Amino acid sequence: MKLQGKTAIVTGAGSGFGAGIAAKFVAEGARVLVADINGDAASDVARSIGANPWVVDVSDNTSVRRMAGKLPDPDILVNNAGITHLPQPMEDVSEDEFDRVLRVNAKSVFLMARHFVPKMKDRGSGAILNIASTAGVSPRPNLNWYNASKGWMITATKAMAVELAPFGIRVNALNPVAGETPLLKSFMGEDTPEIRAKFLSTIPLGRFSTPEDMGAAAAFLCSDEASMITGVAMEVDGGRCI
């Protein structure tokens, strides 16, 4: 029960890694807001783990401000919501796709900080966890702007950590490799046994990241056990980035 008595918001928690993180947080004693743009998905996850659902578009200031009115002073923020563009040459990605990737993967971190950091500063404590990616460490061809958005998130994590440390707020990131989430097919282009085998051959431990892997790492970094850890981008990738 390492998160006993703490409150947390997990964005993009209606599926995949976010759902795994939310479930682990509840199991460790936290009161969790399962936030997702898909209201039905958020409700299903919240019901299954004993949490509260919330519909939010993390790329929209008004929507994030409304969520801040629901839970204005959380102990923990997990910026997990993210999207990608389909694998293709960088110059073929449309402007709309580019804008959407940067809105969801980067602007959302800014908006969450804008609405929640002031209360954390007033309280003198808080933990923020950004879900980045191995793509921000070891970029893969044809996912250029997704790679860039996750590299941005890693740099933002370190910059936030330095600025917020004097206020008692820790900021860390996790870098998962691809997992069994709704984004897997988008990363691979298509999901076939051959493509899966080729992808898995690049991961020394020979498997994808799971929601449970992410939940365990997230719970540690957001707990008091990690009170001396800030500015870290921890790879949860089975050795992919070695």
Image: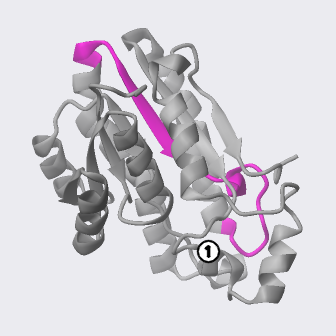
Residue 89 colored in magenta in the image: no
How crowded is the residue under tag 1: few (<14 C-alpha within 10 Å), some, or many (20+)? some
In the picture provided, is 111 more to the left or to the right than 85? left
Residue 137 colored in magenta in the image: yes
Residue 68: x %, y % from top left: 17, 42
Q: Taking 170 as reference, is 181 above or below it?
A: below
In the picture provided, is 200 more to the left or to the right than 220? right
In the picture provided, is 228 more to the left or to the right than 138? left
Residue 44: x %, y % from top left: 27, 68
Residue under pointer 1: 184
- Colouring mode (rainbow / by chain / secondary structure / one colour): one colour
**Residue occupying image coordinates x 83% and y 87%:** 194
Residue 154: x %, y % from top left: 61, 41
Residue 213 appears in view: yes
Q: Which residues are magenta?
A: 121-144
Q: Nearer the viewer, residue 173 or 43?
A: 43
Residue 132 appears in view: no
Q: Amino acid at mark 1?
A: Leu
Occupied quadrant, residue 92: bottom right
Occupied quadrant, residue 9: top left
* Quadrant in which the N terminus appears: top left
Occupied quadrant, residue 168: top left
Residue 42: x %, y % from top left: 27, 64
**Residue occupying image coordinates x 42% and y 66%:** 15
Number of marks drawn = 1
Q: Taking 42 as reference, is 90 above or below it?
A: below
**Residue occupying image coordinates x 74% and y 90%:** 192
Secondary structure under tag 1 reads: helix
